[in-house]
Structure formats: structure tokens, C-alpha cells
Image (spheres, rainbow, N blue to C red):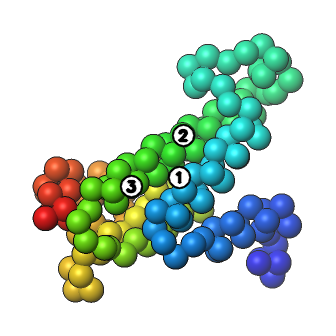
Amino acid sequence: MADVSISDASCDLLKHFFHLPPDPLAALASIESFLVLTMNQLGHHDFATSSDAFTSNKTKREQKRDAQLKKSIHDALLGLQNLRALFVDLKSAVALRLDLGLRQEAYTSGLMFQVVNNQNEIMAEGGRYDALVVKYRYNIYSIFEDIVD
């Protein structure tokens, strides 16, 4: 990573994602603990309100950037909770591939993921959620029912 001019601090942050456990639920728990730790390091505040101590020393641009980062982490945590609930309800084992996009502006929300029921059958593939809905014309319940059955 040093060849492409990524700082040591950024490399240290990314190393966590290259050492995920093979078990999907353990990987989700590991990512969740990392995101919660990151949120705590940023100083967790409600998105709608902010304290004077938090905003007084920062420019509006920094405040906006921090708010966007916190919202992204919050959305990722919600996505992890939904994936965990999906795995708990599954009757058979499935493979999960997490693709953590490094360019947030390329996605609308949440983690990019792919759930594979069989080697030849992909139930949900990576991409923006709204693009998947348009592409497959599925609602979330029919996808969930197909995976659970």
C-alpha cells in the first residue's frame, strides 16, 4: 500500500478488514466492533443536535465532513444489524462476500454485499440498493423468502 502513497494511519485502519474471520457472523461482529470504536473515537453525538463544545472549534466544512462520516458509520451499523438478522433466520449456510467501497460517493447507502445460495445462483449481488431493486424488480420480502426457503 505504500507504493500508492497511502498514509501509515490509513493502512492501519484498513488492515482490520483484511484479517476478518471466515465465519460470516464473526466477521460481522468484528466489523461492528471496529465501527463502534471508530464512532466512539469521533465522539458520538446525535445527528440532529450537536453540542457547543463539539462545534465551536471546527469550521463548517469540518463539521459537515464529520457529520457525513458519522452518518455513513451509522448506516453501516444498521446494514450490519440487517445482515445479522438475515443470517440468524437462514435455514442453510450461505457464503457472504463483503465489498467495502472506498469511494463513498459511488454508493447511496450501506454495505455492498453478495449473498450466494448455490454456486450458480446469486440471490443478491453487489451494487446500490435502488439499482438492485430496479434490476430485479424484487421487493425485500421476496428476496428474503427465496433465501430462507
User: Hey, what amino acid is under mark 2?
Assistant: His
Residue topped by disc 3:
83
Residue 34 lies, with reference to residue 94, above or below; the image says above
At a point 68% along the width and 31% down the height, the residue shown is 44
Is 14 positioned to the left or the right of 141 in the image?
Answer: right
At a point 25% along the width and 75% down the height, the residue shown is 117
User: Hey, what amino acid is under mark 1?
Assistant: Glu
Q: Is residue 80 visible?
A: yes
Q: Secondary structure at mark 3?
A: helix
Residue 10 on image: x %, y %: 78, 62
User: Hey, what amino acid is under mark 3?
Assistant: Leu
Specify few, some or many for label 2: CA neighbours under 10 Å numbering under 14, 14-19, or 20 or more.
some
Residue 90 on image: x %, y %: 26, 62
**Which quadrant of the figure contains the N terminus?**
bottom right
Residue 50 on image: x %, y %: 67, 18
Q: Earlier in the sequence, mark 1 or mark 3?
A: 3
Residue topped by disc 2:
74
Query: Which callout, 2 or 3, points to the residue nearer the camera?
Result: 3
At a point 81% along the width and 27% down the height, the residue shown is 58
Residue topped by disc 1:
105
Residue 93 on image: x %, y %: 31, 73
The answer to which of 99 and 80 lies nearer the viewer is: 80
Q: Earlier in the sequence, mark 2 or mark 1?
A: 2
Q: Secondary structure at mark 2?
A: helix
